[in-house]
Amino acid sequence: MAAAVQRTGLRSDTIRSWERRHRLVHPARSPSGLRAYSEADITRLVLARDATRLGHPIGRVAGLTDDELRRLIAEAGATREEDTTPERAAVARTLAAIERYDFTDAMQALQLSSLTLSREGFALRVAAPLLRSVGASWDEGRIDVAQEHGISRMLGQITGALALQQFVDPSRPTYVFATPPGEEHEFGIALAALIAAGYGNRAILLGTCVPVRSLAQATRRLGADVIVIGTVMDVTSDHLAYVRELRGSTGRRPDIILGGRGAQAAAQLLRAERIEAIESLERFADRMRAA
């Protein structure tokens, strides 16, 4: 492990996570349980590192072959010089400011983007790529917990302010956004709510760890047409039970969307409950545009 860390520049806990959760590499084990990484393992870890630095989620990266990863990285390198959009510049400026603890400059970069872009544009082209880049920087040890908390606080302030400035078209549906108990990550549903609000929908963000009875009651009181449940965790039997109880409490309406990693697999297990699965913000934006 020490050699793998030195060769790849990744932290040991990142390598273990990519091995256990995403099956990226399969190192041999000594009789005492020590990992032994081959040259092929090191090559694959380096390719995955470079791909995640470009903003690709590790869940997708782990499913690609080494040759596919090389093409992905090469294509990004070929277009990097000409792909200097204001959004990418804002992400780079914010991340650089965070790395040097310049929170004022980071906030100014984010505020400027939020003022010049649509809600969907800010969510998809600035906030989401920034969060992925922050995650990669954390994995590589380039930022610490104070810097990660700083960017989370700033994004929370900006997305909260944008959510309050929504124009609601009375002919459009009401969306309610929440995460189930145990899921404390709010950015997925917060950015989805911004996208929904940008199309004139009434978007109500209830927050994280919402008990199923509270969510059902809020849905009835608000007259919600759609419930969006987000999670970054692997879907478990508790998630399935949560959705089944929610459907039993609310009836055939409203529609229920399960978003995040594993949503598609969960929806297959919940066919009788008529659950829609949307695994990415980009797909959610596609749904809003189609509507």
Image (tube, helix red, strand yellow):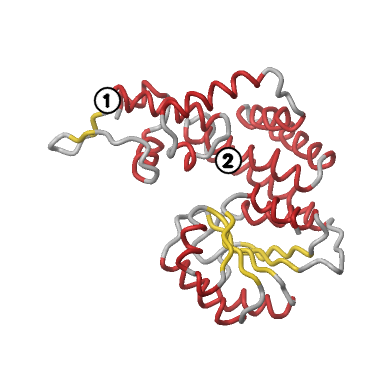
- Left or right of 66 in this view: 106: right
**Callout 2: SS:** helix
Q: Is residue 72 above or below residue 229?
A: above
Mark carried by residue 148? 2
Residue positioned 69% across, 67% down in the render = 176
1 or 2: mark nearer the eye: 1
- Left or right of 180 in this view: 161: right
Q: Locate the C terminus and report the quarter of the image it occupies.
A: bottom right
Tell me which label, 1 or 2, sits earlier in the chain.
Answer: 1
Q: Amino acid at mark 1?
A: Ser
Q: Residues within 10 Å of mark 2 (few under 14, many from 20)?
A: some
Residue 86, position as x, y percentages in the image: 77, 29
Q: CA distance from mark 1 to mark 2?
A: 33 Å
Q: Nearer the viewer, residue 112 or 119?
A: 119
Q: Nearer the viewer, residue 185 or 59?
A: 59
Q: Nearer the viewer, residue 42 or 265?
A: 265
Q: Amino acid at mark 2?
A: Glu
Count of marks, rendered view: 2
Residue 25, position as x, y percentages in the image: 33, 35
Mark carried by residue 176? none
Q: Is residue 141 above or below residue 250?
A: above
Q: Residues within 10 Å of mark 1 (few under 14, many from 20)?
A: some
Q: Nearer the viewer, residue 76 or 209?
A: 76
Mark carried by residue 38? 1
